[in-house]
Image: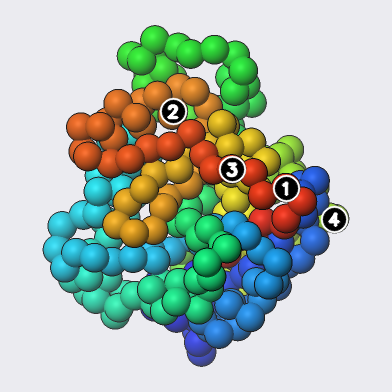
Amino acid sequence: MPVVSAVGTGRPSCVVAVDALGVVVQITAADDIDAIADAVPPSAEIVAVDAPLAVPNRTGMRPVDQLLAWLDIPAFPVSGERLDKVYGGARGPHLLARLRRPDRLIVETAPDAVLRELVWEAVHPPGAGVLDLALYRERWLDVRTARYRPKGTGRAVPAGRASAWAILAGALDLGGWFPDPHPDDWAAISDAAVLDALAAAYSAWRLMTAPTQALLVAADGVPFAIPADANLRNRAKLHGSRLGISVSDGVRRASGTPSHGDGD
């Protein structure tokens, strides 16, 4: 979701629901905090959101963002000052308040990191073993995903959206959804919102169904989660210990419960 708000901008957010079998059962556009929260089904036990949900520091970076940088995963440096300057503020904490329940796990996630891990796993499946750390970092740095978010008028990057769709279609049953092959600018933005939400939903589904193949980082009151093989988890634990961050192998499976993602 846009960090400030989608209201009146034509730039939608999207909520995607995935059932326990990995089938997409809901794709809902939403244009403000209330619409996003209302679109998340009450049965959701794990919700993954592509937005900063906690902004505890006025300046600098959050520990989780520092850890992502150590893992060679580009991360927007989240602070109150930066969000005010770039986006005019942060609405993620308001969404968190709407979504919170005692029986629900809410995590931040990063669609680009989700897609990158899926590309990595296409060549190095999670059960393939652990590489030497230096070799892993060298190969990880070579993994790239195509850009698919429009950055301006006439920059719809349909090839990038097709690539992201193919990556996600290899991990989830997308229920027949395809990006528009010939979109105008707003259709391209809507497709990018769906792709971000699909990646977020996959992160939640992976955490639910294969917790030992996910990374769960406790940071600043809101966990951060992405899919991860043993290489990424081991590296995260190494650097997490240096930064004083708790890194888990995942969370207890919530059997039979749909997982959900929200992305911009």
Q: For the residue marked with disc 1, what is the amino acid?
A: Ser
Around disc 3, counting alpha carbons within 10 Å, would you say few (fewer than 14), some (14 to 19), or many (20 or more)? few
For the residues labelled 4 and 1, the Cα–Cα distance comes to: 25 Å
Q: Say whether residue 147 is left or right of residue 159.
A: left
Q: Position of residue 151 (x, y in %)?
A: 46, 63
Q: Nearer the viewer, mark 3 or mark 4?
A: 3
Compare marks 2 and 1 and give the one earlier in the sequence: 2
Residue drawn at point x = 44 percent, y = 28 percent: 232
Identify the residue at horizontal 48%, vertical 29% (top origin). Answer: 143
Residue 70's spot in the image, x, y percent?
A: 28, 35
Q: Secondary structure at mark 1?
A: loop
- Sequence-wise, the earlier of marks 3 and 4 is 4
Q: Earlier in the sequence, mark 4 or mark 1?
A: 4
Where is residue 204 shown, x and y percent of the image? 60, 51
What x and y, as percent, mark residue 3?
A: 40, 72
Which residue is under mark 3? 252
> Dot 2, crowdedness within 10 Å: few (<14), some or many (≥20)?
many
Instruction: Quickly name the residue at label 4.
Output: 176
Determine the residue located farthest toward the left in the rendered image. Answer: 59
- In this view, the residue in front, 226 or 168, is 226
How crowded pointer 4 is (Cα within 10 Å; few <14, some 14-19, many 20+) is rated as: few
